Amino acid sequence: MSPKFLRIAVVLGLLSAIGPFAIDMYLPALPSIGADLHAGTAAVQMSLLIFFLSMGFGQIVVGPISDMVGRKLPLYGGLALFMVGGIGSAMAPTIEWLIAFRFLQGLGASAGMAVPRAIVRDLHTGNEAAKLMSLLMLVFSVSPILAPLTGSVIIENFGWRAVFWTVTGAALLATILLATSLKETRPVEDRAGSSFGTALSAYRLLMGDRNFLGLTAIAGFGIASFFVYLSSSSFILIDYYGLSPSVYSVFFSINAVAFIGMSQMTGLLAERFGLRRVVRVAVTGYATTMVVLFAVMATGIDRLDVMAALLFVGYGFLGLVIPTTSVLAMEEHGEIAGTASALMGTLHFAIGALAMGVAGVFFDGTPLPMVAGITLCAVISFTLAKVTLGRWREAVEAPAE
């Protein structure tokens, strides 16, 4: 693997990780934010949900813009807006102001979510794209390992506001890397036919593509299951099970290790078995594991070690689902890669935000509603894969797609 290939993966991964970093790093602070700003659980969770919504729907605009003006300019604009939102969040006097600045921060983060996927499609297709996407996921997935641990240390020593100053500094570093280490991948001649009018036409095309929508939804419900975990885990593990913020961060990071480890197998498994077969096996393993977890907890076995073990296995399977479905969905849409990536990201976050909202309605401070929400999303992802990818017992399929 060439140094250039690795450098691009690192830069794209860091750009993609800025948004998740702003989520994962402040998760241990959610209870203390509520206490400091005199806000209830629902209001504090809203600061998380609004970030997801703006980061998701912002991609609808930034994706087509990246097709029209190139990939780098929207990334610069997004990082600048993210830094403004981060500074405002750090200085927010009330929960309402925090929610407002988190909205701005999410809009800025949307560029980092949509554009790197388009850059991957600009550069590669097929198994090469899967390899680059899996490397991007490796850097991207460092966030849920390091961010909660770093966040808990910062919160315990400097308070929750310091988290937002830190992520603002991370965005500044990403801006420097963007300027010095990544070339423009959308040539001027390829932008000539791109406009908001063509973007609307592209969105209509994509909304009529059942394969694109199905693959996007498979990943979307997989991601949604993790969003349900994000929104509830700190309250459950800290308040219900009595973990300290530092121990919670370690617990949270263990799942990310499983996700990372399996995601790095994507290229190898795709070469040997084909991308579609990898998706089928992964969603089956994920849904089965989550159903077992729900069944165990529904029978009254309320044990943190059992939940931790099954979540570890489940999120390992999920690590194979996200990069493979992203590559397959983008495969036939190279000319409108920015728009396709934007719609994919928006649908991912819309599904995730809906799942978080529904899970919040049933949240009662115990683990069972959270586990039920995760399981439901996993089962829907399994069902969509069965429908989208055809008959479960596949016919002859090429080893590489």
Image (cartoon, rainbow, N blue to C red):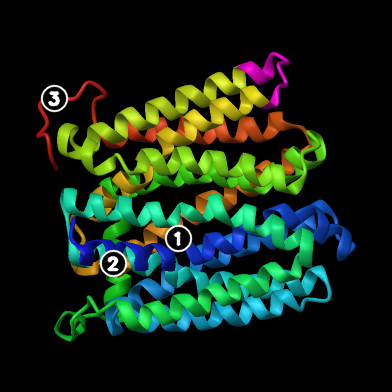
First in sequence: mark 1 vs mark 3: 1
Which residue carries the number 3 mark?
395
Amino acid beneath label 3: Ala
For marks 1 and 2, the one nearer the N-term is 2
Q: Is residue 56 above or below residue 387?
A: below
What kind of residue is marked 2?
A: Ile
Label 3: few (<14), some or many (≥20) within 10 Å?
Answer: few
Q: Quadrant of residue 387?
A: top left
Query: Residue 8's x, y, as percent?
Result: 28, 67
Q: Which residue is mark 1?
A: 346
Q: Please name whichever residue, 248 or 69, is drawn nearer the observer in this view of the structure.
A: 248
Left or right: 189, with 17 as reference point: left
Residue 8: which numbered mark, if any? 2
Looking at the image, is mark 1 or mark 2 nearer the viewer? 2
Q: Quadrant of the C terminus?
A: top left
Cα–Cα span, label 2 and label 3 = 36 Å
Q: State the extent of the magenta-drawn residues as a range.
A: 296-304
Q: Are marks 1 and 3 in contact (CB under 8 Å)?
A: no
**Residue 102's x, y, as percent?**
65, 70
> For the point 51% across and 70% down, which residue is it?
109
Q: Quadrant of residue 362?
A: top right
Q: Residue at x 63, y 78 (%)?
A: 85
Q: Quadrant of residue 343?
A: bottom left
